[in-house]
Amino acid sequence: MKLHELHDNPGASRKKKRVARGPGSGKGKTAGRGIKGQTSRSGVALNGYEGGQMPLYRRLPKRGFSKPNRLEFAVVNLGQLQTFIDAGKLDVKAELNEDALVAAGVIRRKRDGVRLLAKGELKAAVNLTVTGASKSAVEAVEKAGGKVTVTRPAKEAADASAAE
């Protein structure tokens, strides 16, 4: 095969549609926008617009509440920990804290803290220091011969001291 014989597969690339280039193009005059009306003109944003009728998102009642200062935790499952221990990325003998989990690649970032959940199975005895943990996760770690130390998140502790 020579350089001049190279080409795309048929249908792999399409030519750009050139609108408003005369009647011979098939997209001349109104350039495929029709005649008159809102969408024939520039600056159209029709998302949620229903022709003057009260739009659906305004007809439906508001529900629920989004807490603006909600805590976001990075989640670690016991199965994930076991996988990283088996791969040799986590040292069982050392104290495993949030920074060690980030360094090993178990989680990408700490956010407001790390929360340990009981999905999966843990066979190794590990000493963990995390922001939060479910009761079943703590039981599973202790059953494997390890220990979990739960620290309160800094934001929550600050909120509690401000309330007192």
Image: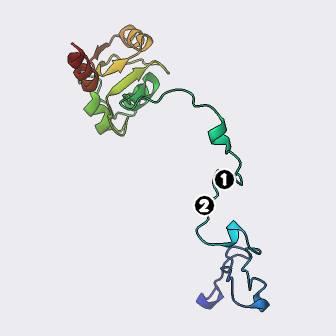
Q: Locate residue 67, reporting x and y percent.
A: 42, 28
Q: How is the image coloured?
A: rainbow
Q: Is residue 148 above or below residue 44?
A: above
Q: Is residue 20 above or below residue 81?
A: below
Q: CA distance from mark 1 to mark 2?
A: 8 Å
Residue 84 relative to residue 49: left or right: left
Q: Secondary structure at mark 1?
A: loop
Q: Are marks 1 and 2 in contact (CB under 8 Å)?
A: yes
Which numbered tag is attached to residue 130?
none
Q: Is residue 61 above or below residue 13?
A: above
Q: Residues within 10 Å of mark 1 (few under 14, many from 20)?
A: few
Identify the residue under disc 2: 45
Query: In front here: 154 or 130?
Result: 154
Query: In front here: 150 or 28?
Result: 28
Identify the residue under disc 1: 49
Residue 68 relative to residue 21: left or right: left
